Image: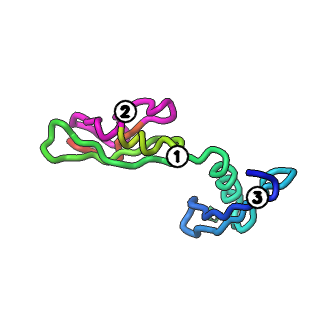
């Protein structure tokens, strides 16, 4: 962002969804509208290196018609979400699988994909 430039954001860290205004000043990003410090941190990250936790489902290859819910165990770059979904669309898992199992290690070197459900 250039000095004087302003962006409007909605903080997604909690259900309050505070409307944030981020303005670049000579001394750095100034954030207003946040009810707590997490909003300022969110705006800083969103405008420099936006990330998201990815959630999806993977097919269980030895259980007809079964899918297991999964998510990354940490945030990955927002710009890689589409590619990540493409990669994971080709991945299947074998039962039994339980909550917390790593089903795909080191997605782009940013996070592991772990099961959030169990299939016996
Ligand atoms: S700024 Fe704080 S209170 Fe507001 S949405 Fe973000 S986390 Fe919630």
Q: Earlier in the sequence, mark 1 or mark 3?
A: 3
Return the residue at label 1.
Answer: 78
Report which residue position mark 2 lands on.
Answer: 104
- Colour scheme: rainbow
Q: Please identify, in this view, whether the residue under mark 1 or under mark 2 is nearer the observer.
A: 1
Q: Which residues are magenta?
A: 87-112
Picture quarter with ligand 1: bottom right
Is residue 100 in the magenta section?
Answer: yes
Q: Position of residue 37 (x, y in %)?
A: 71, 58
Secondary structure found at label 1: helix
The location of residue 7, given as percent across then percent down, is: 69, 61
Q: Secondary structure at mark 2?
A: strand
- In this figure, which residue is indicated by the disc labeled 3? 5
Q: CA distance from mark 1 to mark 3?
A: 22 Å
Sequence-wise first label, 3 or 2: 3
- Residue beneath the point at 28% across and 43% down: 58
Q: Are marks 1 and 3 in contact (CB under 8 Å)?
A: no
As for residue 90 lying within the magenta part, the answer is: yes
What secondary structure is found at the residue carrying circle 3? loop
Q: CA distance from mark 1 to mark 2?
A: 18 Å
Nearest the eye: 6 or 63: 6
In the rendered view, does 58 fall on the left or right side of 81? left
Q: Position of residue 108 (x, y in %)?
A: 47, 32
First in sequence: mark 1 vs mark 2: 1
Are circles 3 and 2 on residues that touch, CB within 8 Å?
A: no
């Amino acid at each position: 962002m250039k000095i004087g430039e302003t962006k409007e954001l909605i903080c997604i860290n909690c259900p309050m969804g505070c409307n944030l205004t981020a303005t670049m000043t000579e001394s750095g990003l100034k954030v207003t509208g946040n009810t707590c410090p997490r909003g300022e941190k969110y705006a800083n990250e969103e405008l420099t290196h936006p990330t998201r936790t990815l959630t999806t489902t993977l097919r269980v290859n030895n259980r007809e018609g079964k899918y297991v819910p999964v998510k990354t165990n940490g945030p990955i770059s927002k710009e890689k979400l589409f590619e990540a979904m493409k990669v994971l669309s080709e991945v299947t898992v074998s039962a039994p699988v339980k909550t917390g199992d790593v089903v795909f290690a080191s997605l782009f070197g940013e996070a592991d994909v772990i099961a959030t459900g169990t299939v016996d």
